[in-house]
Amino acid sequence: MKRIKAIYPGSFDPPTNGHLDLIERGSKIFDELVVAILRNPEKDPLFTVADRRKMLEAMTSNFDNVSVDTFDGLTVDYALRLDARAILRGIRAISDYEYELQMALMNRKLQPALETVFMMPAEKYSYLSSRLVREVAQLGGSIDCLVPPLVAQKVREKMDVAHRFEKGEPATGKAQAEGKRKFRKKKL
Ligand code: PNS
């Protein structure tokens, strides 16, 4: 019997409980699920691709059929290289639908053999996004219920470096360079 492999592409900056919820649901209906982090040189992410990969690997270590990878270029080309049959995406609310539909139809145009499968995360995550997690953390709010503990810790470390730089407190090496960059950008 043919095993069905799917990819779950995204930015995951940072990965949230909503992503994890979707990964768990996807792992139950696909034989194999590859969480695929886009390497996007145009964006200025909070976390490097390597950091995001480490976090996602730790978050998914208890799922036997889930792996984590990175890709660039077209999602459909990456999916074909992996011999995947489906692209998994989450839809939280109607507001997601238009963008997701557009993307799914474009992907179908590019590669008709691939199906996009939409799943809904648990309702309690319907308001959750990586962007809001970054914003709440930057403004000093708690993100403990929004992301796994290891991600919350990593986000706190990032914010700490940026805040220390803002207050003129010493930081060294990589942390200092990063603090400067985040401070200059103002927007995390
Ligand atoms: O988590 P995100 O940022 O909503 O994920 C968006 C992502 C990575 C799935 C999308 O930007 C994407 O597929 N990018 C790869 C380039 C591509 O294939 N573009 C055409 C999509 S129709």
Image: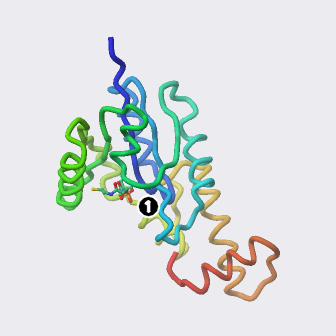
**Residue at image mark 1:** 130
Q: Relative to 99, say whether 33 is above or below.
A: above
Task: Give percent across and percent down for residue 55.
Answer: 59, 48
Which of these two is toward me, 55 or 79?
A: 79
Q: Relative to 51, say whether 161 is above or below.
A: below
Residue lying at 25% horizontally and 41% vertically, measured from the top left: 116
Task: Give percent across and percent down for residue 142.
Answer: 53, 64
Residue lying at 52% horizontally and 67% vertically, measured from the top left: 45
The amino acid type found where label 1 is placed reads: Ser
Q: Relative to 176, say whether 100 is above or below.
A: above
Residue 29 lies left or right of residue 66; in this view the side is left
Which of these two is toward me, 44 or 24?
A: 44
Residue lying at 58% horizontally and 56% vertically, measured from the top left: 152
Residue 126 lies left or right of residue 62; in this view the side is left
Q: Relative to 104, say whether 42 is above or below.
A: below
Colour scheme in use: rainbow
Kindly indicate the quadrant of the structure image that contains residue 32: top left
Q: Is mark 1 within 8 Å of ligand 1?
A: yes
Number of marks drawn: 1
